[in-house]
Image (cartoon, grey):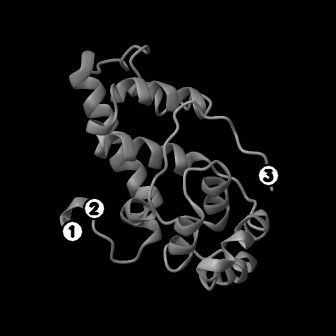
Amino acid sequence: MSDPIEHTAKFRIPASFIVDWARLTPGELHYGYTNQWISSADVVELALGSIVPSGSKMGIVEEISLLLSDELDRIPELMDQLIDRDDRVWTYLALAWVHENQEEFDDPFKTVDLIFADFGYPQDVGEFVTFMPPPPGGVPGYPGLRQRWKDYLEQNRSEFFLSRTPGARNDPREDA
């Protein structure tokens, strides 16, 4: 199996959250599993209907979706067949998880800072980390950081969920 990337922000994102925020490609599913953002059971749940078709890889996704609970030991071997990495969706999902579950983190903005470092300092995330200056004309301090974080999530949801899901609504909390 591929070697995972060492992340300092460590938590799992449940499939039940992911299905409301993104549709994954097979390569993105592989990245999330390899880097322990999702469990084996979550891989199967996501493979059942939250994967964006990707040509030849869909046969592997179908095979994963049909695994029984006593066959989960086959996940590593099957996941290695999906290698096509894109960690951008996982940066977004990790930041969405922290945003929607802030009460579970001692300091959500410290976690944002760690995610920023873990994923190689992506420029679009730098606008709402605590140790970076606001963009020109941007509101300083925590109110500005919160707004830019929210804007980032909305923009990325458009890319990773709305554009990949026919008939999708913009706010995942509308179902709550």
Q: Which mark is residue 172?
A: 2
**Labelled pair 2, 1 in contact (Cβ < 8 Å):** yes
Q: Is residue 167 above or below residue 146?
A: below
Q: Is residue 123 above or below residue 4?
A: above
> What is the CA distance from the residue labelled 3 to the residue labelled 1?
36 Å
Q: Quadrant of the N terminus?
A: bottom right
Question: Which amino acid lies under the numbered mark 2 shown in the image of this protein?
Answer: Pro
Residue sitting at x 55%, y 50%: 37
Residue sitting at x 33%, y 27%: 106
Q: Which residue is mark 3?
A: 2
Secondary element at tag 2? helix
Query: Which one is closest to the eye, mark 2 or mark 3?
Result: 3
Pick the residue in front: 168 or 105: 105
Label 1 neighbour load within 10 Å: few <14, some 14-19, many 20+: few
Secondary element at tag 3? loop
Label 3 neighbour load within 10 Å: few <14, some 14-19, many 20+: few
Query: Of the residues under marks 3 and 1, which one precedes in the sequence?
Result: 3
Label 2 neighbour load within 10 Å: few <14, some 14-19, many 20+: few
Question: Which amino acid lies under the numbered mark 1 shown in the image of this protein?
Answer: Asp
Query: Of the residues under marks 2 and 3, which one precedes in the sequence?
Result: 3
Mark yes or no: residue 82 visible: yes
Percent x, y of residue 133: 39, 13
Furthest-front residue in this view: 70
Percent x, y of residue 142: 25, 21
Percent x, y of residue 27: 67, 61
**Labelled pair 2, 3 in contact (Cβ < 8 Å):** no
Left/right placement of residue 121 relative to residue 73 reads: left
Q: Which residue is mark 1?
A: 175
Secondary element at tag 1? helix
Q: Is residue 45 above or below residue 139?
A: below
Query: Which one is closest to the eye, mark 3 or mark 1?
Result: 3
